Image (cartoon, rainbow, N blue to C red):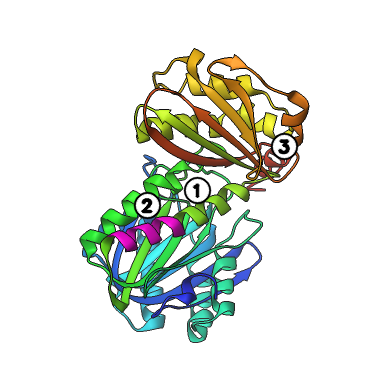
Amino acid sequence: MKSICGVEGVTAWGIKEGKYGLALIRADGTAAGVFTKNLMKAPPVKLMEERMKLGRLSAVMVNSGCANAYTGKRGYEDAVSMAEVAAGCLHITEEEVGIASTGVIGRYLDLPLIRDQCTRVSPHLERSGKAEEMAARAIMTTDITEKHSLVRGEGFSVGGITKGSGMIAPNMGTMIALLYTDAEVSPQTLRKALKDASRRTFNRVVVDGDTSTNDIALCTATGKAGRVKTGEFSSALEECCRQLAIQIAADGEGATKLLEITVIGAPSEEDAAVVARTVAESPLVKTAVYGADPNWGRVIAAAGRAGVRFDPDAVNLWIGDGRNRLALVKEGEIVVDLARAKALMQGKKVVFELDLASGTGRATAWGCDLTEKYVEINGRYTT
């Protein structure tokens, strides 16, 4: 088991039928959530923002194929009905059911299908590698690969699955992330840890610059492993989220390369994060990465429009493939060896490290290249 079913107290299953899938995960415990900052929040997000004030979940159900977004009053009522369906199948309290939806915006849920799928999925809940695989596949839309992570702490575990490939520029948590731990964690500690982890991981992933209407991350702590040190738990949760965030970036729609941007020497960590995200979301940088074109000027130009003050004539810039590194700029002077730089861009991962020489702030953001396939996927997304 490589993710959620590696956590004590978690059972799962899922089903995928064409574009429409449903994942059901059973786990009782303390819970927290982070949500999209998009003004056009989908009804499932609005419902969960209210419900998560209770700080507890007994199960989570996610449907794929229909986002139930921009659906007004009916959409909200359908979100409530969706939670009721899961509660009825699992014989639990409806207020303790977490829900999330992903897929096409502006279409209503097919509640009869969701009811039918939930009825068929709920008897199969189990703790196994097959179960987490079925759940991870069920929530995929344009994703090519499942996304799993399991981090072992001192006597406890943190696991998670995500979906996300397009409309990726989170401003809260992620597209959809379902996280679990068997550590015993208070609601207050869990909320802070999830918020901090999201800020340093999911919030630093950029595929196309669009923040989804349905972004949601939920974390449930079953407490089966007992109390753990707050710092150790927070570090494990952040590492789990980081692994998932990188998988999202690598699976961006149409992507052929993972793009990693590390900014050091910034006035603050937040400044470094702003610059790293700005570079990662630049269409000019992303297309240069696709073409294996070591156009260092695009990186510097993107950094310069990020709104963070630094001296462009003092910066240092390197390019790498995750194993080897080559200087492109030293203290503002161009030193690039184009042939060697281009060779470093031939693999599946391209890394830029930018030193702003303006402080001690450091942050990393992740993205991917921009290809013709992205246009093809999104030019026909609803048809």
Q: Kindly identify the residue that appears in the image at 45 percent across and 32 percent down.
A: 264
Q: Which residue is mark 3?
A: 344
Question: In the rendered image, is residue 53 in sight?
Answer: no
Q: Which residue is mark 2?
A: 197
Query: Residue 129 appears in which quarter of the rendering?
Result: bottom right
Residue 69 located left or right of residue 134: left
Q: Secondary structure at mark 3?
A: helix
Tell which circle, 2 or 3, labels the residue nearer the N-terminal end: 2
Q: Which residues are magenta?
A: 231-240
Q: Nearer the viewer, residue 349 or 60?
A: 349
Image marks 2 and 3: residues in contact by CB distance under 8 Å: no
Q: Secondary structure at mark 1?
A: loop
Q: Kindly identify the residue that appears in the image at 48 percent across and 33 percent down.
A: 263
Residue type pointed to by label 1: Gly
Q: Which mark is residue 211?
A: none
Q: Which residue is mark 1?
A: 106
Question: In the rendered image, is residue 221 in sight?
Answer: yes
Q: Label 2 neighbourhood size at 10 Å, few (<14), some (14-19), many (20+)? A: many
